[in-house]
Image: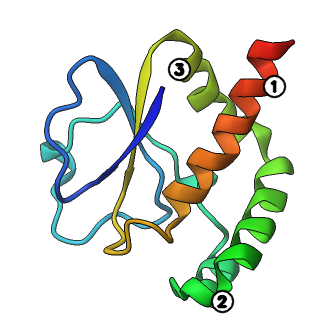
C-alpha cells in the first residue's frame, strides 16, 4: 500500500519504507532529522515540467499526462518504489502545500496502476 505524507508533517516512518520524491530538498528540513529510506530525485518531474505546472489545478490533467510520459521513459527511477510496495507499506514524502495537486499524488496514481498490472500478471 502506498500512502502520501507531507514532509513537514511526517512523523517516523515506522513499519513503512519512506521515499522523498522531490527533486529539490524541502526548505527548513534538516537531512539528519528526516528518517527516510531514500531520496529519489529522479522520480520527480523534470524542472521544465515543474515550472510549467506551478501547482495550477487547471493544468492538473495535462501535468499528469506529461509526468506519466516522463515516468514511462525512466522506469529505473520508480521501480524501487514498486518493489518496496510489493513487499510492504510505502510512504511517499512530498513538500507541496497543495495536498491534491502535487507530483507525489500523481506519482501514487501512476505507481498504483503499475502495481495493479504487476499483481494481475
Residue 33 left/right relative to 65: left
> Label 2 crowding class (10 Å Cα cut-off): few <14, some 14-19, many 20+?
few
What secondary structure is marked by label 3?
Answer: helix
For label 2, the residue is 52
Residue 58: % across, % down: 62, 89
Disc on res. 84: 3
Q: Nearer the viewer, mark 1 or mark 2?
A: 1
Q: Nearer the viewer, mark 3 or mark 1?
A: 1
Residue 44: % across, % down: 58, 59
Please report the residue visible at 72 percent of the width from the left and 74 percent of the height from the top: 61
For label 1, the residue is 117
- Residue 38 visible in the snapshot: yes
Please report the residue visible at 24 percent of the width from the left and 72 percent of the height from the top: 27
Residue 104 left/right relative to 8: right
> Label 1 crowding class (10 Å Cα cut-off): few <14, some 14-19, many 20+?
few
Residue 1: % across, % down: 48, 25
Q: Earlier in the sequence, mark 1 or mark 2?
A: 2
Q: Quadrant of residue 116?
A: top right
Please report the residue visible at 54 percent of the width from the left and 63 percent of the height from the top: 103
- Residue 78 visible in the snapshot: no
Residue 42 left/right relative to 105: right
Q: Label 3 to label 1, Cα distance in Å?
A: 15 Å
Amino acid at each position: 500500500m502506498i500512502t502520501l505524507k507531507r514532509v513537514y508533517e511526517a512523523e517516523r516512518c515506522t513499519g513503512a519504507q519512506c521515499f522523498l520524491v522531490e527533486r529539490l530538498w524541502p526548505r527548513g528540513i534538516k537531512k539528519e532529522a528526516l528518517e527516510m529510506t531514500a531520496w529519489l530525485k529522479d522520480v520527480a518531474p523534470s524542472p521544465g515540467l515543474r515550472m510549467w505546472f506551478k501547482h495550477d489545478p487547471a493544468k492538473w490533467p495535462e501535468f499528469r499526462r506529461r509526468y506519466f510520459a516522463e515516468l514511462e521513459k525512466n522506469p529505473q527511477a520508480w521501480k524501487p518504489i514498486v518493489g518496496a510496495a510489493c513487499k510492504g507499506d510505502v510512504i511517499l514524502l512530498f513538500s507541496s502545500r497543495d495536498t491534491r495537486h502535487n507530483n507525489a499524488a500523481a506519482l501514487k496514481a501512476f505507481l498504483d496502476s503499475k502495481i495493479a498490472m504487476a499483481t494481475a500478471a
